[in-house]
Image: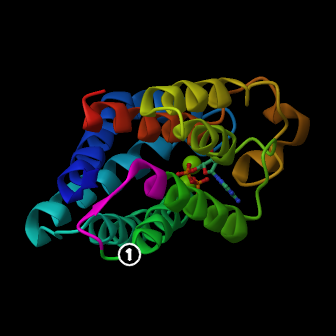
Amino acid sequence: MLDADFFRRWMTATAASVDREAQRLTELDSPIGDADHGSNLQRGFTAVVNVLEKDAPDTPGAVLTLAGRQLISTVGGASGPLYGTLLRRTGKALGDAAEVSEDQFTDALRAGVDAVMALGGAAPGDKTMIDALVPAVDALADSFAAAATAAEEGAAATIPLQARKGRASYLGERSIGHQDPGATSSSLLIAALVEASGE
Ligand code: ADP
Ligand code: MG
Ligand code: MG
């Protein structure tokens, strides 16, 4: 079973990983974006860790809805509302239980990813964070480690794609040949589940 502490560790591990990889995320956002993805997420997840320390929500659902709200209010770029929606919707789907099963979490994260697709209009293959998140959710029934591998492969698979959503889509064919920054940060988010679980 997964409790509020697990979800707090997930957010803390994500923040640490985003800190370590911020420069790489911003570099990926340079040829096909505006070179701010690393700093956007660094600001956002730092604020998430701070608010979780201050407010100490005591259920999985409350941890994720608070984290999502914080991302929406601190990240100006496209990724803020999208990641914010992912966490908020996932948290909402977890309800107010003190502990949730891994299967419940998988279902909730699927609802979160569906909400991101509804908000941003992206489908798999459009070269966005969705290309890492959908395979991750599909593999999550196996293990956190399998989900992390699937997300990383999904991010790498965005390289040959032409972007159809977000800023990178303005480049048309020139977006081909670059890994999507949001798919890359999504793979960090999913990999942080492995750290949080100690798996
Ligand atoms: P901005 O483009 O506003 O500067 P960021 O650089 O923080 O925002 O985030 C860019 C990432 O957001 C992209 O790499 C992509 O993965 C994701 N993204 C952008 N638009 C969409 C969308 N409509 N649906 C899903 N993901 C998107
Ligand atoms: Mg950007
Ligand atoms: Mg920007």
As shown in the figure, which amino acid type bears the numbered disc 1? Answer: Gly
Q: Secondary structure at mark 1?
A: loop
* Side of 145 where 196 appears, left or right: left
* Side of 86 where 51 appears, left or right: left
Q: Nearer the viewer, residue 61 or 18?
A: 61
- Dot 1 corresponds to which residue? 95
Q: Determine the residue positioned at 26% across, 59% down.
A: 48
To which quarter of the image does residue 19 belong?
Answer: top left
- Any part of residue 181 in sight: yes
Residue 142 percent coordinates (x, y): 53, 33
- Any part of residue 29 in sight: no
Q: Over which residues does the magenta segment extend?
A: 97-105
Residue 115 percent coordinates (x, y): 63, 68
In the depicted structure, whether residue 101 falls above or below residue 184: below
Q: Nearer the viewer, residue 172 or 11?
A: 11
* Side of 152 where 18 appears, left or right: left
* Side of 181 where 47 appears, left or right: left
Q: How many callouts does the rendering have?
A: 1
Q: Is residue 102 magenta?
A: yes
